[in-house]
Image (cartoon, rainbow, N blue to C red):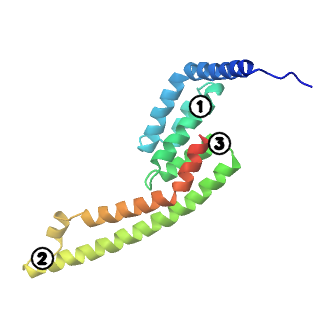
Amino acid sequence: MGKIKTAAEIAMEKTRQINVKNDTAEKYTKYIKAAKVLATSLLESKSDAEKIMEALKRYPEEALDAVKKVFFRSFAENINLSNTPDILKMIHHLTADEVILKATAEVNSIFQHCHMKLKEHLKEAGRNNEELMRQKLAAEGIRGSAIYRINRHNDILENISSRWEAEYRMQLSGFRSFLSQNA
């Protein structure tokens, strides 16, 4: 039979494990902070995945797990229709995990569908809005579309975009929680 550990011994072991994790986190704090900046620059389309991966090559191997977690959390919180392709490309650079890659393939198909539908709705709304504006101008005796194009109102287009964005985020809620859990 093995030795039975006392509660104090178990607590000491856990404390040592926590201290090792804290020491590691403190040791790589500057890399984690830099990773947050890199993730934000990708999300805001100020940088691309290839440039970020070049920067990550200079990071110590031991820091990469913590850095990946930072990226995954940022991606889970901030994925939207405009940055999805960059995020998916970055995830493919960061991991070879088949489950995550399969999930990104599903997200890509959702993105393609939503992006196509959004374009169709925006095009249709633009045509409808233009026709309504021309009718209003014609009722006032003004012909042509030059004035319409100068005074164009984007409220309808913004409304459609925001509705599709909300729909997209709802469809990705499972992926976002999955990505957060893997962080």
Determine the secondary structure under disc 2.
helix
For label 3, the residue is: 95
Nearest to N terminus: mark 2 or mark 3: 3
Q: Position of residue 81 (x, y in %)?
A: 44, 56
Which residue is drawn at the image coordinates 62% and 43% (left, top)?
Answer: 182
Quadrant, the N terminus: top right
User: Is 21 situated left or right of 160 in this image?
Assistant: right
Q: CA distance from mark 1 to mark 3?
A: 13 Å
Quadrant, the C terminus: top right
Which residue is drawn at the image coordinates 41% and 43% (left, top)?
Answer: 44
Q: Residue furthest right?
A: 1
Residue 66 — which label? 1
Do callouts 2 and 1 mark residues in contact (Cβ within 8 Å)? no
Q: Amino acid at mark 2?
A: Leu
User: Is 178 situated left or right of 44 in this image?
Assistant: right
- 66 or 125, which is in the foreground? 66
Q: Amino acid at mark 1?
A: Ala
Which residue is drawn at the image coordinates 47% and 45% (left, top)?
Answer: 77
Determine the secondary structure under disc 1.
helix
Nearest to N terminus: mark 2 or mark 1: 1
Q: CA distance from mark 2 to mark 3?
A: 56 Å
Q: Amino acid at mark 3?
A: Thr
Determine the secondary structure under disc 3.
loop
User: Is 141 situated left or right of 120 in this image?
Assistant: left
Q: Position of residue 100 (x, y in %)?
A: 64, 49
Q: Is residue 104 above or below residue 51?
A: below
Classed neighbour count for the residue bearing mark 3: other residues with Cα under 10 Å, few (<14), some (14–19), many (≥20): few
Residue 137 — which label? 2
Q: Position of residue 136 (x, y in %)?
A: 14, 77
